[in-house]
Amino acid sequence: MHARILYDACPLCEHTEGDSVGTASCAKHPLYLPSFPDTMRWLRCGACGHVFADGYFGEAALAELFSTANPNQLPPGADVERLRQLSSRMVERVVAARAGALGKWIDVGFGNGALVATAAEFGFEVLGLDTRAEAVQRLLELGYPALQGTLEALESPTPVDVVSFADVLEHMPFPRKALAKARSLLGPRGVLLVSLPNLDSLHWRVMDRAKTNPYWGELEHLHNFSRQRLYSLLNDEGFEAVGYAVSERYLAGMEVVARRAQPAMTQDQK
């Protein structure tokens, strides 16, 4: 049995006290295997209010989990043209935030590859990054650059212009580390794109009331963000949110575009 590694503090603010939000079954998740716990326990931080699972999986569990994938998590995905249309609106928001400039785009956890391919279609120099070997191989076969691995291990000889976490940040045990790495890779005019579920949205509340909310039993998810908590986290990690949109990718989702914040000028620089 792959037991979760329990958090000893909030993974965002490191506060050690909080309350239990509840427990949900993950046994019906498409990737569930008997070697994983069949329930998830959710906590709310007593200081920052962040909602997170009580623990995360270690390397052995992740290796088994990443050995399979939903068909829609692999390139080219289902309904390729629809995915292209959805991705195009995401790319357009990034281009607007960059005042029309293109550049180098790294998509972390590219899944079905639609965002990578669409960004390339707009003229970006793209790189897809994913932990699933099959996803990487499929994207390479379609003719797009791809690497297997994590963002934290990635090195770039030149500054990056865009980093995207399209429904990925909520999977990461410690999102601050990924955001700090993204900021270190981005150039002065760099832009970050984040999409994930919004627990403060109307649809989330309706699903909760009807007891049909799938995110409480989402085996791979570790965090449930509100818009306010995401904005606060981005600000803490050196980003300024400049655009909000309702995600068309998944239920109750949000998409946030943020710029790499510039350091404040000293008196000597003024």
Image: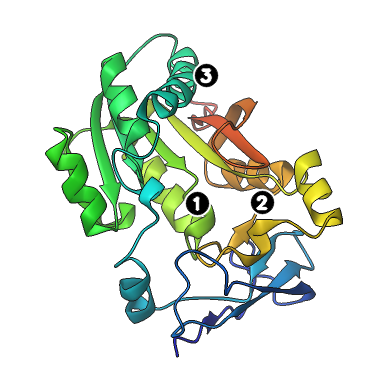
Residue displayed at 44% across by 67% down: 31
Q: Which mark is residue 169?
A: 1
Amino acid under label 2?
Phe
Q: Quadrant of the N terminus?
A: bottom left
Q: Nearer the viewer, residue 241 or 146?
A: 146
Q: Nearer the viewer, residue 115 or 141?
A: 141
The residues tagged by marks 3 and 1 sit, at their Cα atoms, a distance apart of 37 Å
Q: Quarter-wise, where is residue 245 in the image?
A: top right
Residue displayed at 29% across by 38% down: 76
Q: Badge 3: how crowded within 10 Å, few (<14), some, or many (20+)?
A: few
**Residue 86 x %, y %:** 48, 25
User: What's the colour scheme?
Assistant: rainbow
Up/down of 204 relative to 22, above or below: above
**Element class at badge 1:** helix
**Do residues under tags 3 and 1 come within 8 Å of each other at their CB atoms?**
no
Q: Which residue is mark 2?
A: 225
Q: How many marks?
A: 3
Residue lying furthest bottom: 1
**Residue 208 x %, y %:** 81, 55
Q: Quarter-wise, where is residue 25 in the image?
A: bottom right
| In this picture, residue 44 sits left or right of residue 33 | right
